[in-house]
Amino acid sequence: MENTVRTQILPIGDFAFSAGVTLPNVQLAYETYGTLNADKSNAILLFHALTGSHHAHGWNDDLPEAGSFWQPEYFQGWWDLMIGEGKPLDTQKYFIICINYLGSCYGSTGPTSTAPDGKPWASRFPLVTALDQARAQIKVLDRYGIDRFAIVGPSLGGQLAMTLSALYPERVKSVLLIGTSYETPIDHKLSVFEQIMAVEMDPAYEAGNYALDAQPWRGVALARIICHKMFVYQKGLSKRAKKALPDRRGMLTWYTPTQNTESYMLYQGVKFSKRFDANAYIRIMDMWAKFDLPAFTGKKNLDEVCRIYAEHDIPFMIFSISTDCCFTPRDIARFARRMKKNGVRAGYKCIKSQKGHDSFLLEPELYAAEIAALLG
């Protein structure tokens, strides 16, 4: 198929996690798009969103490291509307790298990976932090000999972008943040705990030591339902969920959804349960809930972190989305003002959209002009 891409694997050896555990033979899965120029000055590091993957562009129907979790809905890159020739992230101009997170189930080392004893790491896999991700991902840039690069980070990816920029400010040219802020809102932290409880309370979870072909899928499906409602524009949900769908997998035993919104959420939860490992889900969600930018960078507060960006003259462009229930425009605007107050060259724009948090996936034309200006 035209524009077929393949995942690359970079072994990074032993890796010490923030949790105090060192794992051997750690690897990172990643993809690249475009061509790195002679002086290696056109690189962009792209962070993916919460439960996304490194496959952002093109067609990839072969990822053996992910096993059965690599479902057909993932074969097409998740940001094809933004990446490609003549698009905002133009592959004729830029060399784009997107890397799968540690703890995920799409090729980078995670709970589904095989430990030295021949069994999956499963419950033995440590919790991960944004600090771990930044320290790991910089190794891929080093592999290519890229000293300086721009960063693009939507959603959770924006928080990781902030972390890496504060740890390695001398290497960062510019930062684009979409639908994200320097802290995870308290309602989402509580929601994450609810989601972890949903997985834990599934009898099939077995304290995280289930067989990979016997996933606690009901718990994962419920967790996704709890999460998904925060990522859509709730007032427009009844229009988005056009008709009621049957419970084909048997998630429920007696109750039958009769409202289109109920069946829509059920469908989203069950679909997700086929493509994401339960232990990996807990690691990634816990990472989001416990995001702490000042702590990761050894600073007392956000103001001190902002001064790192200001001292290295790193320009930021920060987008909020008018209907975002996840990171609200009010919170992001406050964050942008605080950045400016501390001397950061931070642009800010609120995108008017009816798509909620997912706007950045669906409406690239709303972001194009500011992206071109920042990268240019």
Image (spheres, rainbow, N blue to C red):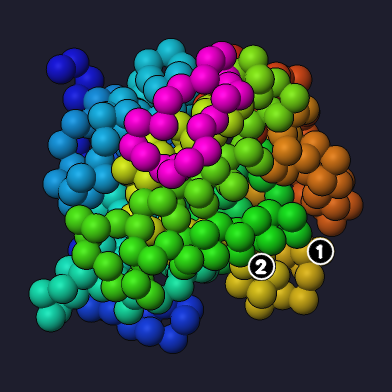
Name the residue at 64% across, 15% down.
239
Residue, disc 2? 292
Is 59 placed left or right of 363 in the picture? Answer: left
Neighbour tally class for label 1: few under 14, some 14-19, many 20 plus, Cα within 10 Å: some
Residue, disc 1? 303
Name the residue at 66% across, 74% down.
295
Neighbour tally class for label 2: few under 14, some 14-19, many 20 plus, Cα within 10 Å: many
Is 7 placed left or right of 50 in the picture? Answer: left
Name the image quarter holding residue 108.
Answer: bottom left
Name the residue at 56% across, 14% down.
242
Point out residue 117 in the picture as x, y percentages from the top left corner: 12, 80
Point out residue 360 in the picture as x, y percentages from the top left corner: 58, 28
> Where residue 74 is drawn, which disc sits there?
none
Name the residue at 65% across, 24% down.
237
Residue type for callout 2:
Asp
Is 188 located above or below residue 7 in the figure?
Answer: below
Check the picture and name the quadrant holding the N terminus. Answer: top left
Q: N-terminal of the two: label 1 or label 2? A: 2
Is 346 located above or below residue 13 in the figure?
Answer: above
User: Looking at the image, which residue sits at the far front?
Assistant: 254
- Is residue 346 or residue 137 the one in the foreground? 137
Is 121 located above or below residue 226 in the figure?
Answer: below
Number of dots carrying numbers? 2
What range is drawn magenta here? 241-260
Does the stretch in magenta take in 250? yes
- Is residue 94 or residue 157 the one in the foreground? 157
Is 94 placed left or right of 118 in the picture? Answer: right
